[in-house]
Image (spheres, rainbow, N blue to C red):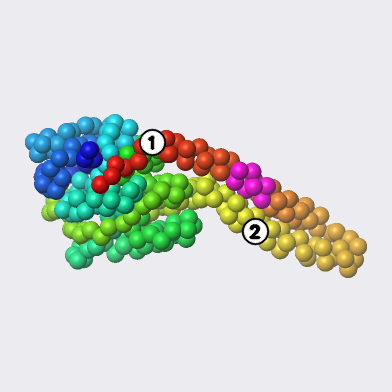
Amino acid sequence: MSARVAVLIPCYNESVAISGVVAGFRAALPDARIFVYDNNSSDGTAARATAAGACVRREARQGKGFVVRRMFADIDADVLVLVDGDGTYDAAAAPAMVALLLSEQLDMVTGVRQHAQAAAYRPGHVFGNAMLTGLVGRLFGADLADMLSGYRVFSRRFVKSFPALSGGFETETEFTVHALELAMPTGEYPIAYRERPTGSASKLHTVRDGIRISRLILLLVKDERPIPFFSVTAAALLLAGLGIGIPVVLEFLRTGLVPRLPTAIVAASLVMLCFLSLACGLILDSVARGRREMKRLAYLAIPGPPDA
């Protein structure tokens, strides 16, 4: 039995590109169902997607993460291709990415962007992607090439076990960490990345969205790696406590007096907070392990990808 494939395209004011995107994936994956989710567009994106032959649905809450949450809840297929509707990703790579997922029995294949046009990938975005990808790779023990790519192929059990808690562009980071935490088999595939069509504007703001992604990484480290997170906090508290308290101790050893009692209290409080932070890390590590086990069991309860 051949795999059922669905193409999911989140869109917001992409009327310039959407017809070509739908046509490209229709040609690349002729047997796939194509769904365009319109996220409050005001430029006729939904009408053009319908005219191009896509099934159009709407998500009223603004933000890519909300659209992805709705897509993953609504659509059931063996293989799901997620791609931005801005016309920058190469539809011709989709069959190879689907074939890689099926032949290797993977749960996620990420399209690693290769760009020949300088205008396709702004320097700020290149730097931010490299920095955040490297950070997540080091924190979660993985070798990643392009964590923020908007072109991915998923298995059904990835999609149906994915919590989708993010609301914006940080959802790509959540994809990656979800796969790493559950030790899912994943792959990467090089894809051509083009400049946006004339008249189309990027919705990604380098600084604002970079801050949001960095904040999500911090929260994920706290939730999934509590011992390292709270150990760093404990070390900072201990250093501050020792820095303030050592002069007081030396003064007491020399004179037998504690003339700076408030300083001594602050130093002792910081050291106590250090040990409290370590205790929180140990407790939350047990909680995180239990949550990880439950998520892993939920993931395994869903059938894997069909054979190629």
Amino acid on which the number 2 mark rests in the picture: Ala
Query: Which residue is labeled 1 in the image?
Result: 302
Q: Is residue 26 above or below residue 118?
A: above
Write the start and end of the magenta stretch as one range.
Answer: 278-286
Q: Nearer the viewer, residue 16 or 5?
A: 5
Q: Is residue 44 above or below residue 137?
A: above
Pick the quarter of the image with the N terminus.
top left
Name the image quarter holding residue 4: top left
Name the image quarter holding residue 271: bottom right
* Alpha-carbon span between mark 1 and mark 2: 42 Å
The residue depicted at 23 percent of the width and 40 percent of the height is 3
Q: What element does badge 1 sit on?
A: loop
Amino acid on which the number 1 mark rests in the picture: Ile
The residue depicted at 42 percent of the width and 39 percent of the height is 299
Q: What element does badge 2 sit on?
A: helix
- The image position of residue 44, as x and y in percent, is 13, 37
Q: Nearer the viewer, residue 305 or 131?
A: 305
Q: Counting other residues with Cα less than 10 Å from the Cα at mark 1, is it few (<14), some (14-19), or many (20 or more)?
A: some
Q: Nearer the viewer, residue 171 or 187?
A: 187
Main secondary structure of the magenta stretch: helix
Of badges 1 and 2, the one in the foreground is 1
The residue depicted at 17 percent of the width and 33 percent of the height is 55
- The image position of residue 224, as x and y in percent, is 52, 47
Q: Counting other residues with Cα less than 10 Å from the Cα at mark 2, is it few (<14), some (14-19), or many (20 or more)?
A: some
- The image position of residue 45, as x and y in percent, is 15, 39
Q: Is residue 55 above or below residue 306?
A: above
The residue depicted at 56 percent of the width and 43 percent of the height is 289
Query: Which residue is labeled 2 in the image?
Result: 235
